[in-house]
Image: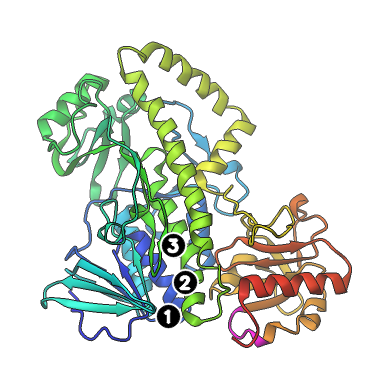
Amino acid sequence: MTYLGRAGNTEVLVVGAGPAGLLVACELALAGVRTRIVEKRVEPHRESRALNLHPRSIELMDMRGLAERFLAEGRTVPGWQFTASLKQHLDFTVLDSRHPYALLIAQSRTEALLARRAGELGVRIHRGYEAVALRQGADSAEVDLTGPSGPATVRARYVVGCDGGRSFIRQAVGIGFPGTRESMTAVVGDFAVADHADIDRARRHGVLVARLEAGLTRFVVMDPRRIRVPSTEPVTLEEFRTSLIRVCGTDCAIDEPRWLSRFGNTTRLAEAYRRGRVLLAGDAAHIHFPVGAQGLNTGLQDAMNLGWKLAAEVRGWASPTLLDSYHTERHAVGHAVTTGTRAQTLLVELPLTEQYGRPARILCELLDTFLGMEEANRYVADRISALDTAYPPFPPSCGADPLTGRRMPDISLTTTVSEPTHLYELLHDGRFVLLNLNGNDETRQQAAGVPSRPGRIRVLSACPRDTRPDLDGVTEVLVRPDGHIAWATRTTDAHARQAERNRALSTWAGAQDR
């Protein structure tokens, strides 16, 4: 356990040491921002609510040189379920990514790896401290805590609430959390003993089964006779066995449960991701039924979007509206995810009901056929994996190339100064990357304003090694620290391109000499 000690030099306080909180702290520390994490749990969770990383989340780790650590701790699979009611799985192998797969990795391992990285960057995690009050001032915010060393107060320039669906931080600043109440529940259990000869049978009847570390097996069951039981009611081993038998004809000989829980389909989205000096990420900003395994992944992507923008604000070089773009960009994604998961949940719930069961099963058969089509699979897989996430032009009034706001793929490059490399290797230090794709030194010679933005931008002339239709005619591209395209141009006029570049750099990377 780490005691709070002297906290007067904190620039950003992160409340919550889950995946989103850990990653945003890593991003801030990478940019040199003094960051602390407080977490009310004394020890990390042993049970793992989430079990996977989707392709975009693996790409995010790749951008920071962490992908190999995660891949070494998990197992890759070629696709993922859209919902448990469909037999057809999404095929990720067709996706335009160097990581076209899902990574099966327990949330506890994800948190451990991110905590290790945070420690390497100098972030301290103070466990056993719970936030009990928050006050905002003109230039700082204060959070009162209770913890193992008694009451404490931390003053920071900004506070990031990553403290879950019941977020104290969100409530303390009065951000609404509208949505839909629980109407269906399911049960989850991790067991040390299970008969694996029956697992395929269970899966054929819609039971989600996953092998975990330490020899555990996870079962997720939706029993038509129990889906209206409130999530607050405890789960017993006898109930779990009975539900398995009712659903698939066998209890798979489960025994020695290590974790039993019930969860519901409450779906909520924060009205704002920022209020003054307080920002939200992860479950503090959005909760939903875990269909498609999008919750943890969406939280990581929130953190990656927020980290570099908040660092820019703390360091004093952000444009006046850069930090507000966090809400603009990620709230829209949160809305899409919560809306989409409500539709996915209906596909799970309706086949289990007496009134709609038969027509719902017919609909599911139709959707199975639909997802078996390559174009349909690619469309839905792009969405679930978040590879299709694209942000609006910033500022909105600016005209933009169609690539603007889209994810930049991890293209292979031949540069004038090094051996062939992949783009994401250039993002390891969290800087912008300005690429001249003509393969000459013109950008380096003409980007006179770049050296006066020290530590913010890497400038490189390079040629893509593979032909890509989406990059046809692109002469220059500015890639954000989170791997999205800030600006792209196809003009061949050097003076016009320089004028566009200067505007883009001022908008995204701040004014010169700041």
Q: Are marks 3 and 1 in contact (CB under 8 Å)?
A: no
Type of amino acid at the residue the image marks with label 3: Ala
Image quadrant occupied by the C terminus:
bottom right
The residue located at (45%, 38%) in the rendering is: 339
Estimate the x, y position of residue 444 in percent, counting from the top left: 77, 81
Which label belongs to residue 310?
A: 2
In the rendered image, residue 471, in percent from the top left (x then y), is placed at: 76, 56
Secondary structure under tag 3 reads helix
Q: Mark 1 points at which residue?
A: 33
Where on the picture, by quarter, is residue 40? Answer: bottom left
Within the magenta stretch, is there residue 483?
Answer: no
Q: Among all residues in the image, which is located at the extreme right?
A: 493
Q: Badge 2, how many Cα within 10 Å: few under 14, some, many 20+?
A: many
Q: Is residue 510 left or right of residue 416?
A: left
Q: Would you say the residues marked 1 and 2 are in contact, meaning their CB atoms lie under 8 Å apart?
A: yes
What residue lies at 56% left-to-right and 80% top-to-bottom?
317
Q: Label 2 sits on what residue type?
A: Leu
Q: Position of residue 147 (x, y in %)?
A: 14, 72
Given residues 301 and 422, the one toward you in this image is 301
